[in-house]
Image (spheres, grey):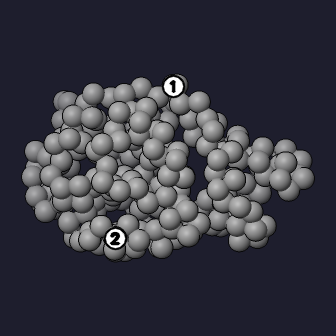
Amino acid sequence: MKPRGGEEELPAPLRARAPLIRHWIFDLDDTLYDPGTQIFTEVKRRISRYVERRLGLSRAAAKDLRDRYYREYGATLGGLVAEHDIVAEEYLSMVHGVDLGRLRRSEALERVLGELPGDCYIHTNASRQHAERVLGHLGLRSRFADIVDVVAAGCCPKPQMGGYELLMERNGIEPGRAIFFEDSAVNLVPARELGVATVLVRYGRRRGDEDGAADHVTYDLAGCLRALCRAA
């Protein structure tokens, strides 16, 4: 639900679960920062250029293939590895070489992440290097105990289950005491199947049919986290 009167309104089931939460899992791009920065838009452009040059395709064909692999594999990288035997590290280095100068630190988010009970984690379809860069620009690196990137997950991106299970196994995460924040509704589905609470982060975007995939929809990540802290 949208914040009302400056307060985030949590649904009753999530509010009741809040005191149990000790594992806070976050997607990276367009979740920890507003997609209005267009950082991930630039990443997608670079993906198209990589596919165009690497596979010798036209610009339009490269974009179509990028989008098809995203739909079928959860990330373009998944399709490129499975069907073209590309080197994941080479691809990730190129597509994530974006200028992060548009990112701005959020004091509110920094503060509330430091107040959460338990540990915070990143689960991303990007590379660890990209995650480290983004977190550094946002002033948040010290807030996160672990990062599971697409390479650690065996180049099996979300929503494939492998990365979720890896994150939980190597950090001893109890699903019933965990919550996952993500801007893509389809990537919340495996988390819910594992018993993890889920929040869809939408910022200024309109509600969509896929919002039902989450236990809660927020337009203000820091505000949602504050509400969960209060409910605890």
**Visible residue check, residue 168:** yes
Q: Seen in the image, is 205 located left or right of residue 217?
A: right
Neighbourhood count class around disc 1 (C-alpha, 10 Å): few under 14, some 14–19, many 20 upward:
few
Q: Which residue is mark 1?
A: 102
Along the viewing direction, whichever of 97 and 201 lies nearer the viewer: 97
Q: Which residue is mark 2?
A: 170
Splitting the image into 4 quarters, where does residue 154 fall?
bottom right
Q: Secondary structure at mark 1?
A: loop
Neighbourhood count class around disc 2 (C-alpha, 10 Å): few under 14, some 14–19, many 20 upward:
few
Real-space Cα separation, disc 1 to disc 2, in angstroms: 33 Å
User: Residue sitting at 28 percent across and 35 percent down?
Assistant: 109
Q: Position of residue 105 (x, y in %)?
A: 37, 28
The residue type indicated by label 2 comes to Arg
Q: Quadrant of the N terminus?
A: top left
Q: Are marks 1 and 2 in contact (CB under 8 Å)?
A: no
Q: Seen in the image, is 32 located left or right of residue 145?
A: right
Q: Earlier in the sequence, mark 1 or mark 2?
A: 1
Splitting the image into 4 quarters, where does residue 137 fall?
top left
**Which label lies toward us, 1 or 2?**
2
Q: Position of residue 187 (x, y in %)?
A: 47, 61
**Visible residue check, residue 208:** no
User: Residue sitting at 28 percent across and 59 percent down?
Assistant: 179
Q: Secondary structure at mark 2?
A: helix
The residue type indicated by label 1 comes to Arg
Q: Position of residue 122 (x, y in %)?
A: 39, 53
Along the viewing direction, whichever of 76 and 212 lies nearer the viewer: 76
Figure label count: 2
User: Residue sitting at 90 percent across and 53 percent down?
Assistant: 56
User: Residue sitting at 41 percent across and 40 percent down?
Assistant: 135
Q: Seen in the image, is 17 located left or right of residue 57?
A: left
Along the viewing direction, whichever of 60 and 216 lies nearer the viewer: 60
